[in-house]
Amino acid sequence: MSIINALPASEPTVAYLGPRGTFSEEIALSFYRGVEGCFTPYERIDAVIRAVADGEAAEGIVPVENSLDGSVNITLDTLAHEVDLRVVKEMVLPIRHNLLARADTKHINVILSHPQALAQCRNYLREHYPGAELVAVESTAAAAYQVASGAKNTAAIGSLRAARLYNLAVPAVDIQDNPNNSTRFIVLARDAAAPAGPNCKTSVICQINGEKPGSLYEILGEFARRQVNLTKIESRPARTGLGLYIFFLDAEGSLEDGNVRAAVEAVRERSIWFKSLGSYPICLVKHKAE
Amino acid sequence: MSIINALPASEPTVAYLGPRGTFSEEIALSFYRGVEGCFTPYERIDAVIRAVADGEAAEGIVPVENSLDGSVNITLDTLAHEVDLRVVKEMVLPIRHNLLARADTKHINVILSHPQALAQCRNYLREHYPGAELVAVESTAAAAYQVASGAKNTAAIGSLRAARLYNLAVPAVDIQDNPNNSTRFIVLARDAAAPAGPNCKTSVICQINGEKPGSLYEILGEFARRQVNLTKIESRPARTGLGLYIFFLDAEGSLEDGNVRAAVEAVRERSIWFKSLGSYPICLVKHKAE
């Protein structure tokens, strides 16, 4: 028996939105503590999702919704239109944004970050940097990296972890507009999760006949009459014309529950297009000491 | 009587998302043909909306939804949380995106545009410029302006009108991912429009008790039981915590119609927070010859 074979089976690869220092990485580390070696960073959210669909990664971690800025459209659109994956876990992370700059920076004219981070600090930026050019980049960590690698008069919005990783000063902490700032992340896989416990949700995507008045009302009725609570309903363009939508529905409970399963089956029958993302447990992630 | 007083009363100022060459300007010109003098460009969508709220402008024109990329969040959030305005008209414009560059550009490493324009050309960019850095700027016209003013190896995504205004070459036309690409614009004013004719809509924003299962179902029921068709339902964060939403509802018909008015009044009574954006006519805008 060779040494190689005696090693434990290789850990499954987990894809996340890189580079190092993103909130997604923080989630990933929190989720699989101490198993840093099997994480693979990708440059874009849709690339993370495709890596799972293509079998490059066993699981992928992507943000799906922020409490201030709403849904992450690229996540929803890619899940709906381009892959066939399941959600196996949801994690909720409190988000804290900070202004990061090189220690020798005197004036800040340009501020880089992920578009949602810029949006989440909109009021702070309008008040403190009304004339600054806001530049959207792929991630909060990419912003920190660009600032660290030398653009003058430039700052990034990112995590304190990113400041440490890229050796940046922190001229302002907690600059998010709202203290109730959390982001929901989901873990994606090709196969459904094991039946979920008590604290779990079920997600489906459907398109209904929008020409027929009351179609959405009837869909919601399938949940309401079975006392299944919907925690979220989100519309996104069906991409076949203005005014045509698909709906993302999150329901409390697991498909193991007869009422949830019956409601989902009824919705499937009423839909002209339907996709189940499965049932999955929810967990609240706490920040590590920073 | 002075000469000044003999002149016609000054035209009302119309605020739009500048600079020159944006789709909003194209809408503005289409809407008030030949009255170019009374348009004022603003740098950001929320600044357009605030200009109307503050009385700097009589009306403001902002994009509210694209058929591929969905709602324009800054428009919805500003209308919901920061001002008290009415919609007086809706205009639908087919969107055509083009790649714009200086005639002497050989290699394109950086592509600038408004985030929604970048999103609407996502597949094209991934296929043709997989390594290019995508940079979000305030508007398609600002992107064209920056390219024209000299960044090397840089291209913009924008209109043919912007190419003409900024003297740029057009290496590729119609690069949007989907031929069904239209954007809805709304005209905002401080007072409600005159009662609308047959082809019109009514918009409201409401927050319901999300703790109570079936609350949204009951809201939709107020429309369904009166045979009022909803053309759109969109959720946005209430900004008071993850999982709390406000809903934007668009209904067919005018508040002059008894059924619409009764449904809206019932929704107002069921809501814990409610705002009416009024009733307004819809028109389809055709591109001018380019």
Image (spheres, coloured by chain):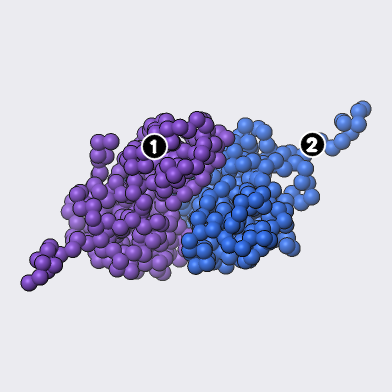
Chain colours: A blue, B purple
* Foreground tag (1 vs 2): 1
Work out whether residue B98 or residue B268 is closer to the camera in this orientation and state it: B98
Q: Which residue is mark 1?
A: B168
Residue at image point 51% right, 36% down: B153
Are the numbered discs 1 and 2 placed on the same chain, yes or no?
Answer: no
Left or right: residue B135 compared with residue A200: left
Residue A121, image x and y in percent? 53, 61
Of residues A53 and B224, the one nearer the viewer is: A53
Q: Nearer the viewer, residue A113 or B85?
A: A113
Q: Which residue is pictured at 37% across the width and 49% down the height?
A: B65
Q: Chain of mark 1?
A: B
The chain holding disc 2 is A
Q: Which residue is mark 2?
A: A10
The answer to whether any part of residue A247 appears in the image is no
**Disc 2 residue type?**
Ser
Disc 1 marks a residue whose amino acid type is Leu
Q: Residue at x 65, y 32 (%)?
A: A55
Mark 2 element type: loop
Q: In 3D space, how far apart are the residues under numbered discs 1 and 2 (Cα atoms)? A: 53 Å
The picture places residue B219, in percent across and down from the top left corner, at 37, 60
Residue B230, position as x, y percentages in the image: 32, 52
Q: Does residue A35 show up?
A: yes
